Amino acid sequence: HADEEGIFLASETISFKQLRQTVQDLPCDLRMVILDSCFSGALTRSKGGKKHPINIQPLATPTRGYAFLTSSSPGETSQESDHIGGSYFTLSLISGLRGAADFRRDGLVTLNEAYQYAYQETLEQTLGSARGVQHPHFDIQISGANEVILTDLGRSPSRFNFDKTMEGRLSIYGTNARLVSDIKKNVGRPLDLGLEPGNYRMILEKATGSFAAEVSLSSGQTQLLLEKQFS
């Protein structure tokens, strides 16, 4: 939890300014913070100057800099849902890292892809909510030759591949009916998701109704799922 000034940790409050300075003082080339709390956008608030899109030049230089990703803008609360059992932003980000944010279909999820996916999903999921639309924020200042890769689907223990013809809101439940991913599946775009081996229940919400499938995933397996498997 947090207010406009900082994060609450037990009986202590860490100001956003103090947190940001502590991270920037770390003796490492690349620093990244993902913060999901109310008013967390205060962490990205800059003093003067203008933000510009990240621009990584094709030079043989190390990747250096920092990235701050926050679940809401400086003046917003970060919303949770009983349906998903937690935060819209965090579930969107995790789903993106599992593969939903792999827009280039190269098996890799980059920092920019993960943020763009979490932003769009959080925005869409909070449209019409009582507290209003939630806007994740970012402050990224990174230089170097390489993009920052957060996940490599090729290293996932097992994967689901959803056929490109499938369309709708896809909710995936794992052990103890825990929601592990909630994804808007667009028609015409195949989707790979890296998941742990186990049993899953999937719900596909379409304009024509709700459809379910019970599936198992073995270690090392990549399983193709078709819409006709849902009933």
Image: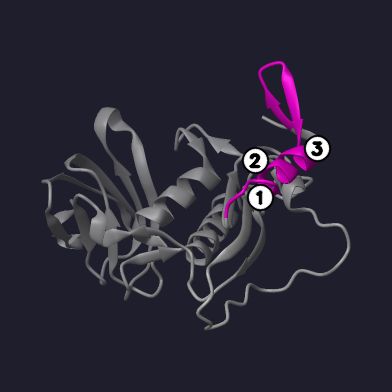
Circle 2: element type: loop
Magenta-span inclusion, residue 67? no
Of marks 1 and 3, the one in the foreground:
3
Q: What segment carries the magenta color?
A: 7-28
Magenta-span inclusion, residue 25? yes
Q: Find the residue positioned furthest to the top.
A: 11
Of marks 3 and 2, the one in the foreground:
3
Residue 134, numbered circle = 1
Image marks 2 and 1: residues in contact by CB distance under 8 Å: yes
Residue 4, numbered circle = 3
Q: Amino acid at mark 2?
A: Ser
The residue under label 2 is: 78
Q: Amino acid at mark 3?
A: Glu
Mark positioned earlier in the residue sequence (1 or 3): 3
Residue 26 at least partly seen: yes
Label 3 environment density (alpha carbons within 10 Å; few <14, some 14–19, many ≥20): some
Position of residue 164 relative to residue 126, above or below, is below
